[in-house]
Amino acid sequence: MDKPQEECGVLGLWSGEPLDAAGLLHLGLLALQHRGQEAAGIAVSDGREFAVEKDLGLVNQVFTEERLSRLRLPGARLGLAHARYSTTGSNLRFNAQPLTARTAHGVLAIAHNGNFVNAKPLRDRLLKEGATFQSTTDTEVMLLLLARMGHLPLPEAAAEAMRLLEGGYSILLMDRTTVVAFRDPHGVRPLAIGKAPWGYAFASEPPALALMGAEYVRDVRPGEVVWVGEGELKSLQALPPNPTPCAFEWIYFARPDSLLDGVEAYAARVRMGEELFLEAPAEADLVVPVPDSGIGAAVGYARASGLPLEFGLYKNPYAGRTFIQPTQELRDLKTRLKLSPTGAVRGKRVVLIDDSIVRGTTSKRIVRMLKEAGALEVHFRVSSPPIRFPCYYGIDTAARKELIAAEKIVEEIRAYIEADSLAFLSEEGVLRAIGRPVCLACFNGRYPAGVPLEGEKLALETL
């Protein structure tokens, strides 16, 4: 892994009339596929019955027409969907979401993006009190906390559970009649609200709302619980807001056409490139992005520098996801399967732009590739600061010992990746580009929403 890995995508809808809830959720989920490519699931209800389908794989691999047909309840009016990347718990079918449970609220379904940093002590307490767990995810801790609050209306139960849980998260929850959306008090993970002719929709990113025929209204506020029942959107501020959303949503994760907390992702990336040029200009002939992650910043760098932007790397759109290969030779060939140099770099001094360096292995292969293709010099510019710390809020950034910037200074990283020069955007540059306070914990180790006592991804695997 030489990139921060996916998080998860969540999606939900509430309709005042029967509609093809499964079909709409399937469409919306395709717009969130980039957020999680390990598992996908959909749950729908018609007010009486619940139908759930989920499995390992990409959205279109899981949701065959046969599976979608099993979700098409004639009177379906609400539903949740989830695209998963495992940040807590193994990539196993029983960890796929939405998770469901029979409780005093009736059947509940939950879809979760992010992580609870105090999930293990809470799970241990629930186990001692007699709870049983069907999965190894921190999501089920929230679900079982809710199950023990059957005396409260569902939105108030969600608010009470939020007061017990720490971390960065966005969650969608539903029973047979109500959809509830809530976000941690720091707003680390995104969650948007949309209005449609048939009702309301919620999604990790606004492009999914558009595919469902819903118009973006606003974001769920940090610490807020929002719910729809009987056609009305209602709100409860469960915890005082202290907004520090994840900077990496703008740096890399969100789709370029997403609007997050009022800031456009693509525009922020272009500004990061402009800031990067102001901080680290290079004597060069052209700017080359690493596709697709470096494109926005490369546009900004080229615009600020006056250098031409050239696509000196071709990304194979059919390469798909590939598994780590067991030998160095095959790992090098895997990189070439995804990326290959074009003639634009021959005889040129290149400014190579990417959004991040995690381990440095892929960056090294790309630099070598460009030089083998005839680039005279490769000046590597990164539109984020060095990643020195792991993320505990839903991004799989690798353990600290695997982060090259945790072990090496910039000059040592430059030597390792064999670039002629290397520079990273400063934290101040990121803040100027995004234009609002954000979480920078993976760069500076200052975690706004706490850290787990046990940071291991599989900490909930054992009893």
Image: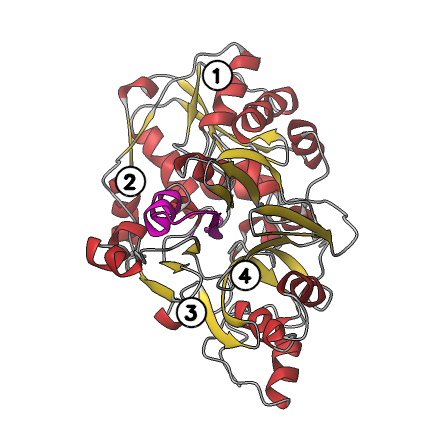
The residue positioned 42% from the left and 23% from the top of the image is 288
* Amino acid type for the residue under numbered disc 4: Ala
Decide which of 103, 429 is in the foreground and name it: 103
Q: How far, Cα to Cα, is label 3 from label 1?
A: 49 Å
Sequence order check: which comes first, mark 2 or mark 4? 2
- Quarter holding residue 97: bottom left
* Amino acid type for the residue under numbered disc 1: Ala
* Disc 4: CA contacts within 10 A as few (<14), some (14-19) or many (>=20): some
Residue pointed to by mark 2: 338
Sequence order check: which comes first, mark 3 or mark 2? 3
Q: Which mark identifies residue 399? A: 4
Residue 438 x %, y %? 69, 41
Q: Is residue 25 magenta?
A: yes
Q: How far, Cα to Cα, is label 2 from label 1?
A: 26 Å
Q: Which mark identifies residue 95? A: 3
Residue pointed to by mark 1: 284
Residue farthest along the top direction in this orientation: 306
Which mark is in front, 2 or 1?
Answer: 2
